[in-house]
Amino acid sequence: MAALSEDLPFVKSDGHDSRITSLTTYRTLGNTGLKVSPIAYGAGTFGDAWGEAWSSGKEQAESIFQHYINAGGNFFDTSDIYQAGQSEQWLGEFMQNAKNRDRLVISTKGTQNQFENDPNGGGNGRKHIIKAVEASLKRLKTDYIDLYFLHQWDMFTPVEEVISTFETLIQQGKIRHYGLSNFPSWYTTKLQMLAQQSFRNPVAAIQNQYSLAARHSDYEHLPMCEQLNIGFTAWSPLANGLLTGKYRVDEDGQLVGKGRLTDSWATDPSVANLATEKNIKIVKTLIEVANELEQTPSQVALNWMLKHRGVTSAIIGARKLSQLEDNLKALEFDLTSEHVIKLDTASEPEQLSPYSYHTKEMQALIHTGTQIAKM
């Protein structure tokens, strides 16, 4: 089977960008004037409510915060549910101590229910989201949020209400831009079209899981972002540690290792499952490429994503300062075309209809041998 990017010409697979060399090679976020670092810091480790495997500890967390900024980073991502609200609180304290709020781009999220058995205590309805934004502002110790995401698709709230709610929050100055995280592409497209038709603020960015082990967004979300000028931010770009080098293939062809995936829980167990044949192949190939380039697996996985897959910013969740330092070096080298092909092939997502139907043979029937150049 050919690689997905070969069968789907609208998936940008040759977008190598050698200009990205550091955190200070900023990128515009979709259709906005915001300039963000290509690697964002995910503050999910700021807090201790989730246990040791997920916590940096407050002193180290503030050191990570400062090191990221000193390296030129300006993009922090969090959520009202991360560490039961502690993530926003710690981030707010760190910004207050550093007195640098206006130099940073802060994104946070809300959807999850904050009040047990309250039908309006969660979801994306106007009642909950306005209250959630106000609570996040207090925890973050700020009077505005640069980018506010709906964290999940609640499957009930109409697109029209979401647009109206965000328009109100923008007019009030509580948020600057908004986005959608983990939403279907059809919902995002509908919202974007309605916003444009009614001359209201459009979707600035989406946030989806994306990595060598989770390339579902290749089907529709990445092409949608390219066509509609929407930023794409990737959560779990290292698949909960699967792609860091902690896990390796043993003599029996099985993945082994010790880390978050064996000691704690994962944000998406179906993707981070060590036992799958595909993950074994991905990790083996990743380690081979990393060894050939004398880079770490984490650096290779992030480089592949940011320089070759059309992702605006990858959200890393380094728990230790040493991990952050390692990850930031991902931008300082270039993969060869041969290495990109090896990684693309090993991580190739399953062909699904209708994309599996649109083969080269089908295109030959459609165009009957004529040569057509896409401009």
Image (tube, grey):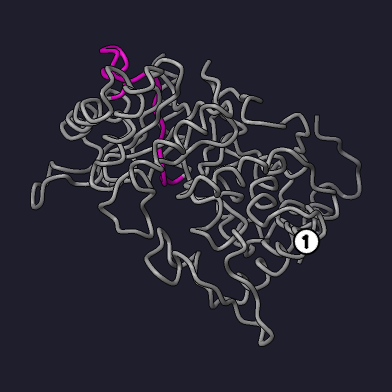
Q: Amino acid at mark 1?
A: Asn
- Identify the residue under disc 1: 291
Q: Residue at x 30, y 28 (%)?
A: 92
Quarter of the image where one finds residue 152 = top left
Q: Secondary structure at mark 1?
A: helix
Q: Quadrant of the N terminus?
A: bottom right
Q: How many marks overall?
A: 1
Image position of 145 with respect to 324: above or below: above
Q: Residue at x 52, y 38 (%)?
A: 233
Membership of 82 in magenta stretch:
no
Q: Is residue 338 left or right of residue 289?
A: right
Q: Nearer the viewer, residue 235 or 3?
A: 235
Image position of 64 with respect to 73: above or below: below
Q: Residue at x 79, y 47 (%)?
A: 335
Q: Residue at x 50, y 51 (%)?
A: 236
Q: Is residue 287 left or right of residue 258?
A: right
Q: Where is residue 228 shown, x and y percent of the image?
A: 56, 29
Quarter of the image where one finds residue 191 = top left
What range is drawn magenta here? 166-184
